Image (tube, helix red, strand yellow):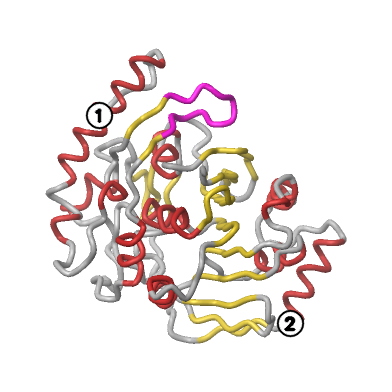
């Protein structure tokens, strides 16, 4: 286990880097060694390594990390359909994955809150009326989502509306498409939704794909990079098996790397994840991850942090506005 928070910034960067190198070596005996032989390599995305740069600004209270992202491999992994799905998912991580799920002791499993996977077989239809209702509520200044956030998400995105208005964007993870309606209400030209369930939208401005189908089209050159992307209360679940997804200690990091590849240089990505409100990282298995500085540093690798807002709910959601550097 690596203790780095009591260090000065100079030694802090050095010790964090040494810790990450050590952890990356240990990881080779776990998740990566159990990957199918025909899947594209994950590279630095599936590690707790990278080049660490101390961050001295007031917006981002964690170090900036740079990793090498091979977008061709990242999208090939996204398109790969032969991953093993454990159904129902285990009530505790397998022994060979435990170290990586817990970041080698830095992200302990604090309690069990077990969810059986939800079926993704049936199609969900969303009418024009549904999306119109969201945009009308947005105009009246009402909260358009099911989270008790005091319209924090709306206010935060409005401060960055120049990334959205008249632009192409995508949403990662949708149960109820309030985000799609909000973005269209903010003037987005069109929206692509990525979701494991099969979604059908009557709105001509919204199209939906499963991640596999989307990545297939991306690799064929049929989809071009986007101006912006958003996700809220989705990525913290990735890789825990709750939504019939493969067990993956780096599922949230892979999802963020996919989004990085999908956004144009200079484009925006907004992500909402559960905040620990302190320096701790943890997992509530198999419900979600809870993010402290060390996991947030990995989550935001290669992004520039523009704003960090704390939006209240049953859990505190850290809503972070990121920009992909030119």
Observer-nearest of 139 and 40: 40
Q: Say if 108 sits above or below 78 in the image.
A: above
Q: Is residue 231 left or right of residue 31?
A: right
Residue under label 2: 128
Q: Is residue 58 magenta?
A: yes
Q: Say if 53 sits above or below 312 in the image.
A: above
Give residue 65's quadrant in the image: top left
Q: Quadrant of the N terminus?
A: top left
Which x, y percent locates residue 181? 71, 68
Q: Residue at x 67, y 66 (%)?
A: 178
Cα gap from disc 1 to disc 2, whole angstroms = 51 Å
Q: Is residue 212 magenta?
A: no
Which x, y percent locates residue 282? 39, 42
Observer-nearest of 290 and 220: 220
Give residue 302's quadrant in the image: top left
Which x, y percent locates residue 316? 58, 44
Q: Work out whether mark 1 precedes mark 2 in sequence or the reverse, and give the earlier one.
A: 1
Residue under label 1: 19
**Which stretch is magenta?**
54-64
The kind of secondary structure element at disc 1 is helix
């Amino acid at each position: 286990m690596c203790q780095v928070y009591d260090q000065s910034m100079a030694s802090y960067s050095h010790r964090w880097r040494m810790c990450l190198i050590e952890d990356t070596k240990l990881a080779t005996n776990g998740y990566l060694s159990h990957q199918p032989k025909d899947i594209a390599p994950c590279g630095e995305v599936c590690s707790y390594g990278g080049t660490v740069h101390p961050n001295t600004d007031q917006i981002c209270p964690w170090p900036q990390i740079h990793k090498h992202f091979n977008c061709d491999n990242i999208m090939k992994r996204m398109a790969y359909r032969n991953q093993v799905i454990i159904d129902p998912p285990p009530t505790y991580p397998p022994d060979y994955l435990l170290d990586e799920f817990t970041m080698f002791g830095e992200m302990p499993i604090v309690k069990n809150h077990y969810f059986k996977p939800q079926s993704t077989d049936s199609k969900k239809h969303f009418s024009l009326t549904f999306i119109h209702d969201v945009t009308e509520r947005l105009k009246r200044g009402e909260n358009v989502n099911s989270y008790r956030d005091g319209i924090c998400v709306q206010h935060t995105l409005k401060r960055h509306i120049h990334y959205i208005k008249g632009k192409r964007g995508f949403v990662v993870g949708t149960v109820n498409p309030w985000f799609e309606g909000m973005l269209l209400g903010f003037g987005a030209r069109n929206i692509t939704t990525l979701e494991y369930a099969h979604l059908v939208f009557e709105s001509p401005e919204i199209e939906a794909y499963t991640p596999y189908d989307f990545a297939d089209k991306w690799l064929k050159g049929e989809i071009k990079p986007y101006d912006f992307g958003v996700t809220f209360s989705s990525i913290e679940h990735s890789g825990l098996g709750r939504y019939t997804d493969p067990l993956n200690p780096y599922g949230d990091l892979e999802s963020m790397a996919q989004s990085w590849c999908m956004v144009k240089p200079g484009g925006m990505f907004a992500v909402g994840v559960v905040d620990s409100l302190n320096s701790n990282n943890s997992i509530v298995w198999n419900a979600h991850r809870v993010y402290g500085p060390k996991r947030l540093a990995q989550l935001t690798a290669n992004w520039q942090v523009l704003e960090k807002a704390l939006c209240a709910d049953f859990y505190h959601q850290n809503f972070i506005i990121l920009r992909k550097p030119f």
